Amino acid sequence: MLKNALIGVGLIAAFGVAYVRYAPLYPNQWHVDPATVERTGKPNDFLMAEGGDQPPAVFAADVVTVAAALDAVVALEPATFVMAGAASDGFVTYVQRSKLMGFPDMISITLQPAEGGTMMHAYARARDGHSDLGVNAARMTRWVAALETRLGSGG
């Protein structure tokens, strides 16, 4: 009886891991404009926009330069790929998976001209779970700092 229960628990755990890694991610669901998105209400997201967790970042460089810098910053991140769009088009959504379990986080970013440079809105959120333990906020803080360093600006 105990053996069957352990086998059952093992199968459920294996299914859970397989779901996290292989469940499809649909761009039409995740590729959203951070400036107009409706939040989930769960503490597993971070919004960098007016009325969000942090205001949009502003960089003292044109959109083309910021887009190239964003591509370079993201290329250094582990387990990260473009889901939809392109930074060079001013609207991109990335997927970054956690190291151990492969939990996907989606990061949608828009770049638009602003007075004195480029404004970046971002919405980073987890697909699974209720809380992300601050991972999305930390990622956006890290990416903005890396962009500021790469662009040589104070943001």
Image (cartoon, rainbow, N blue to C red):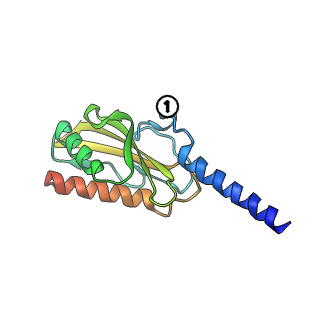
Where residue 128 appears, as percent x and y from the top left, is 57, 51
- Please tell me how many numbered marks the rendered image carries: 1
Which image quadrant is residue 129 in?
Answer: bottom right
Say what secondary structure mark 1 lies in: helix
| Relative horizontal placement of residue 108, taking residue 128 as reference (left or right) | left
The x, y position of residue 49, in whole percent, is 38, 47
Residue extending farthest right: 1
Residue type at numbered disc 1:
Asn
Q: Residue at x 28, y 48 (%)?
A: 75
For the question of whether residue 49 can be seen, the reply is: no
Q: Residue at x 39, y 40 (%)?
A: 35
Point 82% across, 68% down: residue? 2
Q: Which x, y percent locates residue 60?
A: 16, 47
Quadrant containing the C terminus in the rendered view: bottom left
Name the image quarter holding the N terminus.
bottom right
Position of 143 compared to 126: left or right?
A: left
The front one of 118 and 15 is 15
Give the residue at mark 1: 28
Residue at the extreme bottom: 2
| In the image, farthest residue toward the left | 152
- Is residue 106 visible in the rendered image? The answer is yes
Left or right, 113 with respect to 54, comes to left
Determine the residue positioned at 81% across, 61% down.
4
